[in-house]
Image: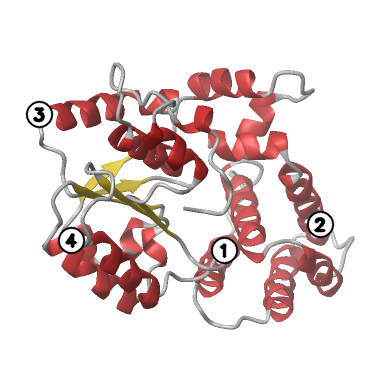
Amino acid sequence: MSETTINLKDYLLPLPWHGEFWQSFNDRIDSQRLPHAIMLNALEGVGAESLAYSMAYRLLCTNVQSGVACGRCSGCLTLAAGTHPDFFYVAPEEKGKQILVKQIRKLCESVVKTSQQGGWKVVVINPADSMNRNAANALLKSLEEPEANTILILISNRLSVVPTTIRSRCQIESLSVPSKEIASQWLSGKAEGKQVNIDEVLEIANGLPLLALDYIQGDGLENRQQVEALLDAMRHANETPLLVAQACQKYPPDDLIDWILSYVHRLIVGELQNKPNPALFLFLDKLIQARAWLLSSANINTQLLWEELFIEWAQIFQSQR
């Protein structure tokens, strides 16, 4: 489990747009047809991690009520405190990096042991697409020879990156982006007392409710708007790429690349929809490649990366001035 203590009220119940999956999940538990491995495939911001925790609570609770964990038993309380002996959470040791083979080997050694609470053992791997090749290979045995009353919940927002050997051994559940109406209603309940245009924030977050919530509660929206203003300034030759690259060093690289990707995509389908420019699509490809580099274990010089990208970005619009 992560170092942050889990807030019970945030995870006992699934999010409103996960209701259909939740009903199916409970039905499979009741009929003893739960698969040994489930892959939650979803965009970041849809709430796959939240759903994984809700599933863990449901399985580890000793006093389930109407298909939902009680929140009061020893199973729920130890899970909330991060001390449940039968819950295993695997994530990159550093944000944006890979899950290493040593982490998976340690997990496999723990999972083969008898459940200390006499019930389910629950494993969450997040994100599964960050496992390097050796880590994925090390996980195969646990998938091919599953332990009794053990479930592996893998989370991925880039399913195509997950090796076929892993995907084929999991039941894949794709989680959709909720409707604007459902997302707005949920966000309204979370943003009480805050002066914010929920529909506008949700649009900036590409309809992803948890990303929108992060923007409302933190400084992510302000940072993202600052970056978009800099991109606009370069478009109109009001800022130089080198100075902008230096200014962007203060932002987390993985967040920054996602903000730029989203901004360029919105330009293509919005403001510049009737002004097709092949160079914009080539630039998108470079951004996607840059994102892959940042997610790899390579030691990337981000200053040089931003300089190269921003110089090309400014050049795209030179001929239009």
Figure quadrant of residue 128: bottom left
Percent across and percent down for residue 312 are 69, 72
Q: CA distance from mark 1 to mark 2?
A: 25 Å
Determine which residue is flagged by label 3: 31
Determine which residue is flagged by label 4: 143
Determine which residue is flagged by label 1: 95
Q: Earlier in the sequence, mark 2 or mark 3?
A: 3
Q: Earlier in the sequence, mark 1 or mark 2?
A: 1
Determine which residue is flagged by label 2: 230
> Which image quarter holds the C terminus?
bottom right
**Above-or-below relation of 32 to 49:** above
Residue type at the position of mark 1: Lys
Q: Looking at the rendered structure, which numbered label has been put on residue 38?
A: none
Left or right: where does residue 39 sit relative to residue 176? left
Of residue 308 and residue 119, the one placed in the foreground of this image is 119
* Pair 1/2: label in front: 1
Q: Earlier in the sequence, mark 4 or mark 1?
A: 1
Label 2: few (<14), some (14–19) or many (≥20) C-alpha neighbours in 10 Å: many
Residue lying at 52% horizontally and 68% vertically, measured from the top left = 93
Residue 7 in sight in this render: yes
Residue type at the position of mark 3: Ser
Quick check: marks 2 and 3 in contact, CB under 8 Å? no
Percent across and percent down for residue 15 are 44, 27
Q: CA distance from mark 2 to mark 3?
A: 55 Å
Q: Earlier in the sequence, mark 3 or mark 4?
A: 3
Q: CA distance from mark 2 to mark 4?
A: 47 Å
